[in-house]
Amino acid sequence: MGHDAFAHHGLGSAALMLISALHQRPHQTVAELVGTSSVSRATAYRTLKRLADHGLVQHTGETWALAPRALEGFGDGLPGADTGRAAAAAQGWDKVAEHHGTAGVAARRKALHAAERAAYREALDRLAEHRTKAVVIVRDGRRVLVPAPRPDEIPPTWHAPDGRVLDPATGRPASDWRVATDGRLILITPADQRSYDELAAAHAEALSEWNSAA
């Protein structure tokens, strides 16, 4: 039963184990329940007390049993097992969850996991956008495939003495490619006629975006 009533701060999973054990075989002692429900003796006593406060279990002598409608979350309002006072009979699992403040926990957890999965997929997509792909350029009327390796893996044979990049197809310097002082391969276009401050700001923005995606 994936119900909010059995959330961590509600009845807990041990309550579900005990209810299941008593449903399979009524009138068990605590020692027997330790074996049939696979919970510790201390947990069994503590959880039975919690269930008895809701009127969901009853005990006669040394044995325990479920209330007639316990599987539906309704208690019978008989005196509590340990306190002798009238138990606050449960009125369904929803009311039990409200009583313990766990109503809506499953829905919030599901929404959180969905948001985390969406954020993870978005991060993967953003990382994929940063994966460098091969570039096809048109040079002298013909298409030239320019591999785009990582910036730190540019073959030395591509480097021209003046900082330009040698066209791998012709061996001549390419006017629009440059090798930066840090060894990165950069493409210079008319749109790149920016000041140093503008380039620095663009670099900082790109670096921030990359770090957030990673």
Image (cartoon, grey):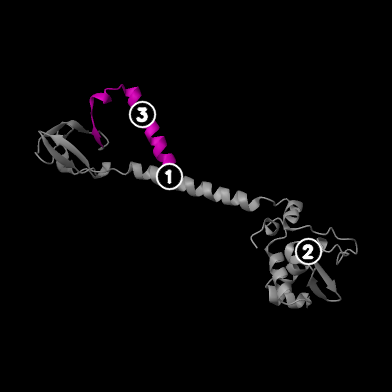
**Measured Cα–Cα span from mark 1 to mark 2:** 45 Å
The prevailing secondary structure element of the residues shown in magenta is helix
Residue stretch in magenta = 185-214
Would you identify the image quadrant in which residue 46 lies?
A: bottom right
- CB under 8 Å between discs 3 and 1: no
Name above or below for residue 186 compared with residue 8.
above
Q: Position of residue 71 (x, y in %)?
A: 73, 66
Task: Identify which residue is drawn at 72% across, 54% down.
Answer: 94
The residue identified by callout 1 is 123
In terms of sequence position, does the residue under pointer 2 or pointer 3 come before the other?
2
Local crowd size for mark 1, using a 10 Å CA cut-off: few (<14), some (14–19), many (≥20): some
* Left or right of 211 in this view: 113: right
The residue identified by callout 2 is 51
Task: Identify which residue is drawn at 77% across, 66% down.
Answer: 69
Name above or below for residue 141 compared with residue 107.
above
- CB under 8 Å between discs 2 and 3: no
Q: Which SS class for mark 1?
A: helix
Task: Identify which residue is drawn at 70% across, 57% down.
Answer: 5
* Left or right of 113 in this view: 64: right
* Left or right of 63 in this view: 137: left
Q: Nearer the viewer, residue 150 or 80?
A: 80
Q: Please state which amino acid type lies under the numbered disc 1.
A: Ala
Task: Identify which residue is drawn at 75% across, 54% down.
Answer: 95
Q: Position of residue 117 (x, y in %)?
A: 49, 49
**Measured Cα–Cα span from mark 3 to mark 1:** 21 Å
In terms of sequence position, does the residue under pointer 1 or pointer 2 come before the other?
2
Local crowd size for mark 3, using a 10 Å CA cut-off: few (<14), some (14–19), many (≥20): few
Q: Nearer the viewer, residue 129 or 54?
A: 54
Between circles 2 and 3, the one closer to the viewer is 2
The residue identified by callout 3 is 202
Q: Which SS class for mark 3?
A: helix
Identify the mark at residue 79; answer none if there is no mark.
none
